[in-house]
Image: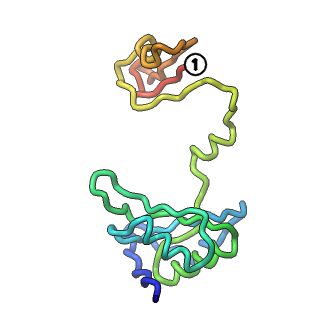
Amino acid sequence: MQEPVIPPAIPAPSSPLKPLDRALENQRGETNVYIRGLLPETTDEMLQVWGSRFGDIKSSKSIIDMQTGLCKGFGFVKYHNYEDAENCIRGFHHLGYEVSFARESFYSKLKTFSDESNTNLYVSNLSKTMNEHELAQLFHPHKVCSSRILRDKNGNGRGVGFAR
């Protein structure tokens, strides 16, 4: 059985394609590849099949719009080794995709500073009018030692807070 063909990329109107040597820059030994230019109908399974052509995959994910159920045009494929990730970049780049080693996200960097013994919870999507007492009540019947709502310079809630 022949593997399905990887379709040509949908070019991004706002950014020119990076030269291959820039796409291959990888100072941290990363094996996670960012791929942009995917068709809206791209599924996780399709991306996994396409990515597996270049090597043994740890994981893959096409980023789906929750409203439409369609791919947002980009995804990630993580390989077990650097060489396979590099082959993926070369292959997808040849087909016109914007592709490079994925950069570490802010939240991923934040995880490296995490403390397993810390009981401080970060809570988002809070009402802008919520106060500290209401935040603590969200965790009832559990005991909350302290709670704090982040506020702007005018004293208005920013929709995020902490509970301990």
Closest to the observer: 10 or 123?
A: 123
Residue 87 in picture, x, y percent from top left: 62, 79
Whether residue 106 is visible to the viewer of this picture, yes or no, is yes
Q: Is residue 117 above or below residue 85?
A: above
Residue found 44% across the figure and 24% down from its top: 152
Residue beneath disc 1: 164
Which quarter shows the C terminus? top right
Q: Position of residue 101 (x, y in %)?
A: 60, 66
Q: Position of residue 73 (x, y in %)?
A: 39, 65
Determine which quarter of the picture holds residue 68: bottom left
- Most extreme residue toward the bottom, as rendered? 2
Q: Is residue 67 left or right of residue 117?
A: left
Q: Position of residue 112 (x, y in %)?
A: 68, 42
Instruction: Please identify the quarter of the rendering in which residue 14 is found.
Output: bottom left
- Quick check: 46 above or below 65? below
- For badge 1, the amino acid type reads Arg
| Between 27 and 124, the one nearer to me in the picture | 124
In the picture provided, is 128 more to the left or to the right than 133? left
For the question of whether residue 21 can be seen, the reply is no
Q: How is the image coloured?
A: rainbow
Q: Residue at x 33, y 67 (%)?
A: 40
Say which residue appears at 57% left-offset and 66% top-offset.
33
Q: Residue furthest left?
A: 68
